[in-house]
Image (cartoon, rainbow, N blue to C red):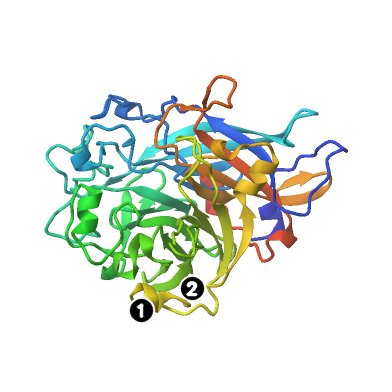
Amino acid sequence: MSKKKWAAYLFISSLFAAAAAEASTDLIAVGSVSGSYEDFALQTAPPLENGIPGNRLGGLGSGLAYAGGNTFLAVPDRGPNAKPYDPSVDDTVSYINRFQNFHLTLAPSDPGAPLPFTLTPMLTGTTLLSSFTPLTYASSGVPPLNSVNHTYYFTGRSDNFNPTQPSTHPLNARFDSEGIRVSNDGLSVFISDEYGPYVYQFNRLTGKRVRVFNLPAKFAVKNLSPNGDTEINGNTSGRVANKGMEGLAITPDGKTLVGILQSPLIQDGGTNGAVTRIVTIDLRTGATHEYGYQFDNIGSASKAKYGTASEILAINNHEFLVDERDGKGLVDNSIAVVKKLYKINLVGAPEISNLTGASNLLGTAAPKTLFLDIVAVLNSKGIASTDIPAKLEGIAFGQDVTINGATLHTLYVSNDNDYVATVIDTTHPLGMDNPNKFFVFAFEDADLPGLVPQDFDDLYLRFTN
């Protein structure tokens, strides 16, 4: 991409003379979206099995993808199952999977504001995800719009699967979308999931699935259940229930998808294992390779405990940021401790496709270095650890900004709010807080050397303009 073409994406603004560019990654803006809003899929608005509207704008930060300019795509997960109603299906409902289109606009803040920029999120569209071919549903889990005009919708209901097939069977209707990235031509989106785990390609305009990327058999579980605990106890190999392909990256050259499991496979120690798997997928051939990522021990020397991986983002074609976190923070008023972004390099990391077992994977992981301690930065800006969202799950680079004459890169972080409209917050003036958050950080070239922007082509520009 030429410098002129990339310049078309840049958002250039200036700040007041008193503001000075900092030499380390810093918070520059925070935005939010009301948890009680509804999205643009009005046809899905009737209440779900648990009484929650079927188009509640929640969970939208499970994955976040940059799409040029101030446009981002946000993917919700499997739907609003935080409200108890039926434990046999893990309280999942017939929510139709979708992605949301957002304009995330930065503007200089007024003098005296605590942060240099103001972020204004605006929802611009909702796209439902579906299949041309019939999918497998349980009799009680069919979404109400299903099979209209030969459209078969993916849904978050945990019982929508074929019990005679492994969990990765492409005709299962259940889908727990977690990661999203945009193709370089702007016409497709790639979405990863926790149920299969699956990695699918969808037409960005229609939401129709156009391709399935097959993962090695080791990632599937054979004995399926709509209840996650039952499924874990009934299998000795495969992904841990609700901890499948949580993160997804696309390399800037647009040739490779890179997924990361939230936790190690069952045969690799499950949630007690230290090393999870990164899977690269060649977009032309579908060929896969596997690499290790080792978690920090957030427990003690006598009783190890590990965080989870919530996202992966390409810096260039071989280096990536991994979002490693605990489950603490806003919602239950617990104290967020670990929300960190680590830089890894797959060059020289051993290929682990033929390795299995927690002990065999130790020492195989790609080297990592800390890029951003989100909790520390937010605390430094006066944001209490109890006010930091527990599930910071979406990360994406955005357009550059100019602060006091210096050009800085931006990193956007979003959260999964579990479709909760409001949460109790004793430190908030109204006693409640908005759970849909976007945090924007700025950094210099020296903070993340080697950063290469994704190479959207002219077809993308025509598509969006």
Tell me which numbered mark, 1 or 2, is placed earlier along the sequence: 1
Residue 25 placement, left or right of 300: right
Q: Quadrant of residue 420?
A: top left
| CA gap, disc 1 and disc 2 | 12 Å
Disc 2 crowd, CA 10 A, few/some/many (<14, 14-19, 20+): many
Q: Is residue 170 visible?
A: no
Q: Give residue 398's position: percent from left, percent from top.
A: 62, 48
Number of dots carrying numbers:
2
The residue closer to the viewer here, 463 or 167, is 167
The amino acid type, in three-letter code, at marker 2 is: Ala
The residue closer to the viewer here, 66 or 175, is 175
Which residue lies at the image location 41% right of the left edge and 35% below the top edge? 126
Q: Is residue 107 visible?
A: yes
Q: Give residue 387's position: percent from left, percent from top.
A: 56, 35
Which secondary structure lies at badge 1? loop
The dot on residue 365 is 2
Farthest residue in the right direction?
17
Q: Give residue 196's position: percent from left, percent from top.
A: 28, 57
The dot on residue 285 is none
The dot on residue 355 is 1
Q: Quadrant of residue 453?
A: bottom right
Q: Give residue 341's position: percent from left, percent from top.
A: 57, 56
